[in-house]
Image: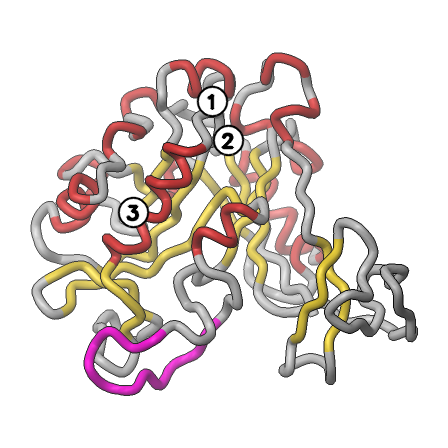
Amino acid sequence: MGFLGSSPLLIFSLFLCVTAAIATCSNGKCKPLDQCSSDGCATGLYCFSCPKRFEGSRCVRSTITDQFKLLQNNSLPFNKYAYLTTHNSFSITGEPSHAGVPRHTFSNQDDTITQQLNNGVRALMLDTYDFMGDIWLCHSFKGKCHAFTAFRPAVDTLKEVEMFLRANPSEIITLILEDHVESPNGLMNVFSTSELTKYWFPVSNMPQDGQDWPLVKDMVAKNHRLIVFTSKKHKQESEGIAYQWNYMVENQHSQMGLGDCIKIAALTVESQHHSMTKPSLWFW
């Protein structure tokens, strides 16, 4: 599909910060990745710090391109567009503890969910768990959420998604769930509580055997603007949540991403039966 065959939906997972050679500048003339102060970046950039990768601050892009406006009438199938996805979208630096104890786990993002969506992210990767009698987002291990790995109740994040969809009636959001929820209908209950079911793209409308998805304009017209995938196969039948690997393929996470010819050859064969491809690229 695409450069893997015939133009799939490409979902890129953003992990870390970009680094490059630095130049000194000022007065609104700083270019991407130049060292900067609060007012030094050129139009369309903002001053950003990434302590894990570089000292000080650098200019990064702050404007996005609406992919749907690149082609008149949104006339392509949904799987012909490429979208930015954030990995562990909920795992946000500085998120206060909501579980009553200090959190001791990794974070992957600096922006809130709303900021990510406003900055052009159109797919979120979320890890869902049963915890404290509810569904939570946790960056945890061995399929269990703990107070020190818990970030927030899932409903809080999903309400941010609902607010964005309500405020932007032509946008489509994809959620990719690493699903550890065992409680019956636990996920669907939290989607109902967050009022997201009214945007739900039904499994019955999803293409089979690598066929194209509906046109974007038709999805918007029907208000089918939320696509949800689960990592648990049985939930496609029991809860109506699409099983991820029935519809997409993904390369092995690495700095090489799609540059690994051996792995991409296997991916190309598998993608003949799936209309979505999720290349995972590590940006440094």
- Secondary structure of the residue carrying tag 1 is loop
In this view, the residue in front, 41 or 64, is 41
- Placement of 35 over or under 163, stated as above or below: below
Query: Taking the image as drawn, is residue 29 in sight?
Result: yes
- Secondary structure of the residue carrying tag 3 is helix
Measuring from the top left, give residue 138's x and y in whole percent: 30, 69
Measuring from the top left, give residue 233's x and y in whole percent: 25, 45
Measuring from the top left, give residue 208's x and y in whole percent: 39, 24
- Secondary structure of the residue carrying tag 2 is loop
The reply, left or right, for residue 102 in relation to residue 39 is left
Mark 2 or 3, closer to the camera: 3
CA distance separating discs 2 and 3: 29 Å
Question: Residue beneath label 1, please?
Answer: 213
Which residue is at 27% across, 55% downward?
A: 156
Query: Taking the image as drawn, is residue 234 in sight?
Result: no
Query: On the image, which quarter does residue 206 sit in?
Result: top left
- Placement of 164 over or under 50, stated as above or below: above
Q: Residues within 10 Å of mark 2 (few under 14, many from 20)?
A: many
User: Dots 1 and 2: beta carbons under 8 Å?
Assistant: yes
Q: Residues within 10 Å of mark 1 (few under 14, many from 20)?
A: many
Which residue is at 29% across, 30% downward?
A: 200
Mark 1 or 2, closer to the camera: 1
Question: Residue beneath label 3, please?
Answer: 159
The reply, left or right, for residue 262 in relation to residue 156 is right
- Placement of 143 over or under 114, stated as above or below: below
Q: Quadrant of the C terminus?
A: bottom right
Which circle's residue, 1 or 2, is located before the other in the chain?
1
Q: Residues within 10 Å of mark 3 (few under 14, many from 20)?
A: some
Which amino acid, by three-letter code, is at mark 2? Ser
The chief SS type of the magenta part is: loop
Confirm whether the magenta stretch covers residue 249.
no
